[in-house]
Amino acid sequence: MREIVTIQVGDFANFIGSHFWNFQDELLGLAEDDGADPIFKNNFMDMDVLYRTGLTHQGAYTYCPRLISIGSQGSLGTLSSSGSLYGDSSSSDATDTLTWKGAVTKLAENPREKNLFLKSLSEEGEDDPNIEDKDRVQCLERDIKFWSDFSKVHFHSKSLYELNGAWTDFQNFDNFGDGKEVLLGGLHMEELNDRLRFFVEECDHVQGIQCTVDDSGGFSAVASEFLENIADDYTNIPVLLYSVRDTFSYTDATKQRKLITRSLHDAVSLSKLSTYSSLIVPVGLPSLGGLAPSLCVRDEKNFHSSAVYASAIHSISAPFRFKPAGPISNTTYAAGSLDIGEIIHILAGQNRQNMVAILDVSMPAPSLSDKANPGGILNSFHALGTEIGDDSEDLYMDESLILNGALFSGADWASVSQVKDSICNVYDKGLRAKPRPSHLSISLTPLPIPLPFPSIFPTTTGRRGEILADQPLEGPPKGSLEVESVPVMTRLRSSISIKPFIECRYNNLLRHGMLRGAKGAGLLRDWGFGKDEVDDMGEHLSKMLRIFNPSSEMTSDSD
Amino acid sequence: MSIRVLNPNAEVLNKSAALHMTINAAKGLQDVLKSNLGPKGTIKMLVGGAGDIKLTKDGNTLLKEMQIQNPTAIMIARTAVAQDDSSGDGTTSTVLFIGELMKQSERCIDEGTHPRFLVDGFEIAKRATLEFLEKFKTPVVIGDTPDKEILKMVARTTLRTKLYEVLADQLTDIIVNAVLCIRKPEEAIDLFMVEIMHMRHKFDVDTRLVEGLVLDHGSRHPDMKRRAENCYILTCNVSLEYDKSEINAGFFYSNAEQREKMVAAERRQVDQRVMKIIELKEKVCSGTDKNFVIINQKGIDPPSLDLLARAGIIALRRAKRRNMERLVLACGGEAVNSVDDLTEDCLGWAGLVYEHVLGEEKYTFVEQVKNPLSCTILIKGPNDHTIAQIKDAVRDGLRSVKNTIEDEAVVLGAGAFEVAARKHLLDNVKRTAKGRAQLGVEAFADALLVIPKTLAENSGLDTQDVIVSLQNEHDQGTVAGLNHHTGDPIDPQMEGIFDNYSVKRQIINSGPVIASQLLLVDEVIRAGRNMRKPA
């Protein structure tokens, strides 16, 4: 077994993670549910890759994500930081202090109230016949404040870590310097390293670390320090990093100072995070309106956008946990098993050593026999990152394609061979240039839609995510009550398209931070970077750019 | 007011409003922390919105937990926390002292004194108090065998302000022994060599000192012994797992056969490393009743564990990085990075190694070591918040012992120093100051009394009575502190109440600096500027 340890850093990363673990929880539930579609009886997916079996002091077995989630203090909502499974037996009489015989002052925050959905999980509202699932779904659409508000997963007591920076204002925790400051003088890193060790020590053979970082603010500094420690302690474990942002982080800065801060932050963040990871995938759009008409996402809701990103990340992680299937690697349910190390090698280790990949998603993916779409289903992709150029001419593109539960026609799922044939067909007919090498992973299990999934599907979506022809186009979006599962197709590509993304950050660092008299030089000093370190970051970014320009490599090496 | 022209949104407070704002903030912070101080203080229980509990009596922890927004308060809090970072204690005292300095200044300023005079007076008083502290402190001869009693008294003084007496006294011995254990002559004390490990189990009085090491993991093979005596300890940082190094080397297999070959070759290399360890084990252990334990910082995969288990070796993987150093200090031998040239000299020794399992948590005790220079304080408590609080107290206690050894001095506690220093300032220093700076010296001297006053207040005593009787004792030339039970003057020396010299010195140093800065603020401009960093 090849275990994965998952790390989530920052609020938006936890939003995505919350959806991600809901999908896993749904898969686990469906696999045991006799009434569920046989396609979910996935004995080819090994959930132990992401989950661990544990035992409480009281002797009860637990099955929890192998996860470390870092958030700001108070970002857990109604969730206790020690989870719900490992509660100490004495918590009922916790009010008597055992260590102090003198006076006790109790300062209690108002207990946060659980929403209808969470109440139904904890059985408080279960008996109430007046509350239906419809009400629960509506309450989630109305009011989501914390990522835990829509989480249905039990977490391990060592999984949730709250960062309590002495006087850090987490409302304005928006740059690298803030993040560095919050770690100063505290024992945060020590504690995080210990927690990570707890999860890694019990693994026989870790295949990699899957890390989601909200890199729009100070959390990218927290993550980069954590990843630096990981790189030191676990030298050979590959790190697949998603650097995510919500739509709010793209709102235009009006003040020049703010603008400079932000562009320097982006540059520093990319440079630092890429130093300590093996593959970095920027995820986050200023607006998800481009995904219409297949999805109708409300940009102002992190609950919505994070669901889309989580679906893509879930899809990519599917081939990491295909069970080895003996001598024949193709089962009837899945094909193209990969581990984290291999996907990183495919994308970042071959033609070029470009380690910034682009994530494309198609959700719900159109059916394979869709006649209306002559370019084949590969034309339905939407990139989930910004500043992406054109790569139609790129000869050195590497890509990895993953299909989850593709539909053949109507609401019929396609078989593994049908999927393979269709994809080959697209390339063979020359409808799209085939990158070499390209890897294809197929899982017949579609993305299950759990109850706390936002209503983002257009009215024309069927139960299995197919397009219904006879439905009116207008109407309220459909959600988890109408749609059971959707086919998802994702692609990671490493191509020249990412060049503008890196270039922009490099130029900003140069202009605002490194040139003589640059306005942001003082800011970088405030963040604790000496001149040498800034130069190193610049050099690192320019190296990441140089690989797209093989001819200039010789000249730049000589200087 | 030109700022208004530049930025119409800027809020400007004029001089006296600004001053009162800062004074109020300082007093507010003082009020929050006041009840913490001393052995009769109040413990705070913080309950979060999701029911998470945090217990603390430590000003430092409390300051960090409070979501302070006021910039003045943040500035004071930062100073106080910096105090804790550098000397391990005195956070509450620093906040109280700054608050009291501001309070005393407010009175003078209201009567028309310019803050500048007060600041000048503070400076004179500060220097004089520091000089006085040099005379007042009680030197401690450390030498090769430090006086354990005095160390215990300092530790006890600290601990009794954080934990109830029985537990505090029990921990006192543990802490002093721990520091003496890791102390090497002629070298700075590295408190990291005291491991603090906790178990959620039983009651707090089960906390104990382990001469040796407690690791928070165990062996990962069912056939390995759970208990072994007379053990060689191999501390190493060697990968005993099959790494997919071809990925990192940039080589990628092109077919299944090639892949198999790669895997086999890599596997062989790992096996060879394991065999080398087994060879050494056979060499040193065969024919004796000795055992062999490997504690590895890197991973050990199941095939390697199998081999080791069959050879009768106990193996632990993924040890903490810092434990590599601690193990060598505790057991001897050396931490090896390669299994080539292994000899018996590389090995450490422990009389007893055993595993303790609590649910999914495993603990490995490495005990009965020779000449340990590293040890473990094992904290037991029934729940997480109790453990956390004991842990904080233990850290403070360790720092106080370390400080004492490094300062080679202590200061009489229970408010004795403050009363004596005040008397010195009023009797000898005040008249040397010029003009109105005298008011500053006087304010400073009165502010010092905040410590004994608060101690008395927290003990439910009448502050004025207590201060008067203490001053009487001092006027008669006897050094007296406060008995927090009765309110009577006592001799802190007799009672064994001692504070850290370095902590006191730092409070006296930093308090007036911050107070002066705050007093000299003549305008507060709030215009979206980041006011969080201290000047």
Image: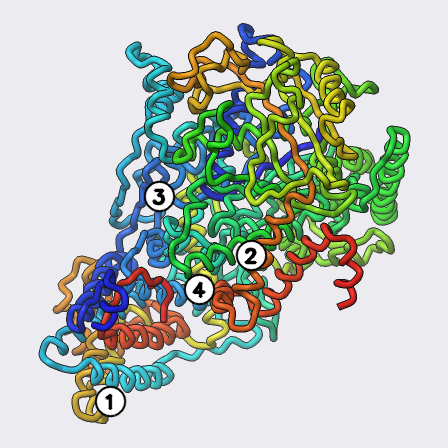
The residue indicated by pointer 1 is B429
Element type where label 2 sits in the image? helix
Which residue corresponds to the image point at 86% horizontal and 53% vertical from the top-left? B340
Measured in 3D between alpha carbons, the distance from the residue under mark 1 to the one under mark 4, in whole angstroms, is 32 Å
The residue indicated by pointer 4 is B85
Which residue corresponds to the image point at 32% horizontal and 49% vertical from the top-left? A100
Q: Are marks 4 and 3 in contact (CB under 8 Å)?
A: no
Does residue A498 sit above or below A180 in this rendering? above
With A319 as the anchor, is B36 left or right in this view? Answer: left
Give the residue type that dot 1 points to: Val
Element type where label 1 sits in the image? helix
Measured in 3D between alpha carbons, the distance from the residue under mark 1 to the one under mark 3, in whole angstroms, is 47 Å
Give the residue type that dot 3 points to: Leu
Q: Position of residue A532 (x, y in %)?
A: 61, 69
Q: Quadrant of residue A81?
A: top left
Element type where label 3 sits in the image? loop
With B403 as the anchor, is A94 left or right in this view? Answer: left
Q: Nearer the viewer, residue B62 or A3?
A: A3
**Earlier along the polypeptide chain: callout 1 or callout 4?**
4
Measured in 3D between alpha carbons, the distance from the residue under mark 2 to the one under mark 1, in whole angstroms, is 54 Å
The residue indicated by pointer 2 is A268
Measured in 3D between alpha carbons, the distance from the residue under mark 2 to the one under mark 3, in whole angstroms, is 47 Å
Give the residue type that dot 2 points to: Val
Task: Tell me the mark number nearer the camera, choosing from 2 and 1.
Answer: 2
Location of the N terminus of chain B by quadrant is bottom left
Location of the C terminus of chain B by quadrant is bottom left
Measured in 3D between alpha carbons, the distance from the residue under mark 4 to the one under mark 3, in whole angstroms, is 27 Å
Residue A98: mark in rendering: 3
Does residue A466 sit above or below A242 in this rendering? above
Does residue A421 sit above or below A249 in this rendering? above
